[in-house]
Image (spheres, grey):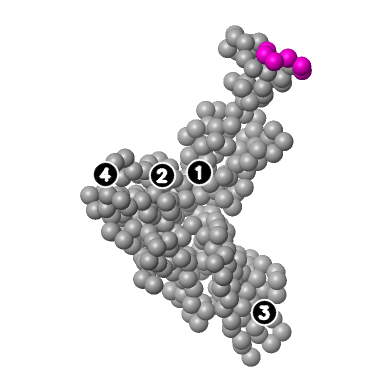
Amino acid sequence: MQIRRKAETPEKTEIRLKLYADELILSIDKTSCIKCDICSIVCPQNAIWVESSPDGIPDICIDPQLCVLCEVCSHFCPVSCIELKWNNTPKKILESQHALADFPEKISVDRRCCPEGCSPVIELDNRWCRRDRKWIENLHELCPKYCHHCLESCPRTVYTLLEDEIVFDTEQCLRCMTCTLFCEYGAIKIEPVFEGKITLDDSKCPSDCVKCIDVCPVSCIERDGDRVFLKYDKCAFCGACVNVCDQDAILLERFNVRSEEGDFCELWEKARDNLKKPRGNLYRSS
């Protein structure tokens, strides 16, 4: 006996496969989904895709009759918004059997490299800064050694301040390298998964279009008048901009998918090869 059901809300999509004694559940957190092209490319059944809408806001869709709950999309999802469970336990059969290669660790921070600010002087409005040799307000955050560049520069809210200490959420990180560009102490190391090239022909861009700018999860696209620019050194090669562009102005090429070395299943080999194919717009019209 198999009973397959799909439930969908603006925040979540869920597929349930009920067997005799067991149940498999695939859930997609649509609020966390960045509408990239990765899951649609790696899916061996073409069961998941990004769909256009009249208002220009893309949506993630899945066909419950095509989906075989194989784990591939959840393994590749860069923001962990796809989850599979077997009887309410995470389903990681392919991972446990080493059928899919692991990716490099996203982010590491060596806090020994981070400077420590001087402590405020109690009950004083101002204090003498020994480094800059001048009087400054008696506020911890005004100390020139009080560095929050990673917190302030990250477009993904990966970093948060918790009791005067910076903590980071690896699931939010898209490996865009922005924080490493702003960190002057070399404390942060990011390991990208994709190596590639992205090109934007802004001669095709309508003068009032900001779709790619709005959808980019790492804020690496900007408009200046009639011109549209890509900040190449901050691009995560996720493909979200390619999906939302209906003018075929953006081309994404991934040259390499960085992962551990070894022999893995055919699903892995096919997914990796598909990711390395040049990509234009992948939209399906609604």
Q: Secondary structure at mark 1?
A: loop
Residue occupied by mark 4: 226
Q: Please identify the dominant SS of the magenta region.
A: loop
Residue occupied by mark 2: 220
The answer to whether any part of residue 255 appears in the image is no
Residue 144 location in percent, x, y?
A: 59, 20
Magenta segment includes 123: yes
Q: Which of the two discs, 2 and 4, sits closer to the camera?
A: 4
Magenta span of residues: 122-127
The amino acid pointed to by label 3 is Glu
Magenta segment includes 184: no
Residue at image position (36%, 71%) is: 285
Compare marks 3 and 1 and give the one earlier in the sequence: 3
Relative to residue 171, is residue 185 depicted above or below?
above
The answer to whether any part of residue 226 appears in the image is yes
The mark found on residue 23 in the picture is 3
Q: Which of the two discs, 4 and 3, sits closer to the camera?
A: 4
- Disc 1 vs disc 4: Cβ atoms closer than 8 Å? no
Q: Which of the two discs, 1 and 4, sits closer to the camera?
A: 4
**Furthest residue in direction top, as rendered:** 133
Residue at mark 1 to residue at mark 4: CA–CA distance: 24 Å
**Furthest residue in direction right, as rendered:** 122
Compare marks 2 and 4 and give the one earlier in the sequence: 2
Residue occupied by mark 1: 155
Are there few (<14), some (14-19), or many (20+) residues within 10 Å of tag 3?
some
Residue 239 location in percent, x, y?
A: 40, 56
Residue 251 location in percent, x, y?
A: 31, 55
Q: Which of the two discs, 3 and 1, sits closer to the camera?
A: 1
Compare marks 1 and 2 and give the one earlier in the sequence: 1
Residue at image position (60%, 66%) is: 83
The amino acid pointed to by label 2 is Cys
Q: Secondary structure at mark 3?
A: strand
